[in-house]
Image (cartoon, rainbow, N blue to C red):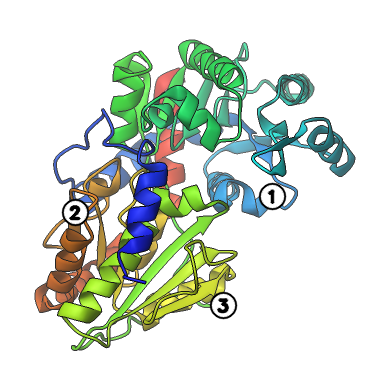
Amino acid sequence: MAAASPWRDLHRKYGGLYLEHPIRPLEGRDPLESFEYAGGQAMTALGGEAERLRIGYACLWEPVRDRTWSGSAWHLRQAMLPLCDTVDIGVQLPSLTRTALKAVHTRYRGGRFTTSWCYSRLTDAYVRRVFRRGISENSKQRRIDAVLMIDALAAVPEPFFVYYDSSWDALISSADSPERYAAVRLITPANMRRRREMQLSVYERATGVIAESHWLRRSLIEQSGVSPAKVHVAPPAIVAGKSEGGEARPLREREAPRRKLLFVGRQHEVTDFYRKGGDLVVAALGILRRDYDPQITLTMVGMEKWPLPGEPPEGVNFQGVLPPEEVAKLYDSHDLFVMPSRMEPFGLVFVEALSRGMPCVARNACAMPEVITPGVSGALIERDDPNELAAAIADVLADDDIYLRCAARAPQMAAYFSWQRAAREVVDVVATTIR
């Protein structure tokens, strides 16, 4: 089977998904250019009255809390604890309640049983009731100054802020029709419209909306109609790159020839693999091994089973799903991170790679240009073209200057994309808005 055949097959099947997004990315934005300013601004506010704030932290927790929202919700809350009085008013569904909701909403679709329990009216009503009760009970002890919620859970009387990486408007507009996107999310179009309207209602009543990227800020303003005055940006953070003792691991020296590519993306469906451009990477590998260097290899992580027809082609090391500590080691043993996502609200895996001195090849779309600077930390492609991707990979692998720059910038990337910095900026937004 030709290397490009799986790419062509998936492109025909999912061609109406993850098209060129109507919200184009900003011109290249080096995240380190504003590093000192961002940290200084947050610390100035916290030096005044921010430490006396009592913030209710609202999140729909997973059964294992530190895995919620890929760990981001937990680590943000932990980083906020030294900065303000943080009260957990989040919702954690009892296991029996979660099981019952899943059972009630299980349907047979597309030849298999699926459940859309997390999008149901019943689940929404339950979460709102528990969430508001948590606010009420904590307010009896001492008034909550503001509420910070992860995603738009519900509108509440107290000043409240929403922090998230995407919105229904941003996601829906990545497909050729709302119905097509609803099918990907295994949700009915009517229910998706209901949840979109609910989200817009929460945005309208929110004191502030904190986006993870400038790209999402534009979408919230231009697509969702949120007032520019109340949309703020606080990039997220990573926790990878530390040893068990908490110390940063020394950077591995990367010397030519560089031949080991890495693709990491948590995926549950073939559509996730397509969204992250995994098909393009496999096709580009075939071109690279044929035209550039037959010893180039690709390690792929994050999929429970091989998502393309047949067995992994020659040169592909399919690792399946690995624990975070094992993934962290791969950044140090590979030469180039490649993930040309068709839709990527932020992409913390790029930050994880760059904080270890590994350049990245991605796509000039969504928030990816806010993390990757072409010629400095990697390259960005423009189209669904395996040949363009293969050329970009070959160029970066051969560019010694990019590797020197990435190695030099790695400590600062890790310092900027820390949860301490993210927490300071989030608390700063709350403090300066309500005071």
Describe the element under mark 1 as helix, strand or loop.
helix
Q: Quick one: 409 or 304, which is closer to the camera?
A: 304
Q: Amino acid at mark 1?
A: Arg
What type is the residue that disc 3 sits on? Glu
Viewer-closest of 89 and 225: 225
Near-viewer residue (433 or 212) = 212
22 up-or-down from 346: above or below: above
Q: Secondary structure at mark 2?
A: strand
Q: Which mark is residue 125?
A: none
Residue 1, image x, y percentages: 37, 72
Residue where numbered disc 1 is placed? 65
Where is mark 2, residue-wise?
381
| Disc 1 packing (10 Å; few <14; some 14–19; many ≥20) | some
How busy is the neighbourhood of tag 2: few (under 14 within 10 Å), some, or many (20 plus)?
Answer: many
The percent position of residue 77, horizontal first and vertical second, equals 58, 44
3 shown above or below 93? below
Q: Which mark is nearer the camera, 1 or 2?
A: 2
Cα distance in 3D space between marks 2 and 3: 36 Å
Please indicate whether residue 288 sits to the left or right of residue 66 in the image.
left
Measured as percent of width and height from the top left, residue 396 is found at: 16, 71
> Residue at the spot x=69%, y=50% of the render?
65
Q: Residue at x 47, y 63 (%)?
A: 308
Which residue does the numbered mark 3 point to in the structure image? 244
Q: Nearer the viewer, mark 1 or mark 3?
A: 1
Q: Is residue 407 left or right of residue 65?
A: left
Q: Quadrant of residue 24?
A: top left
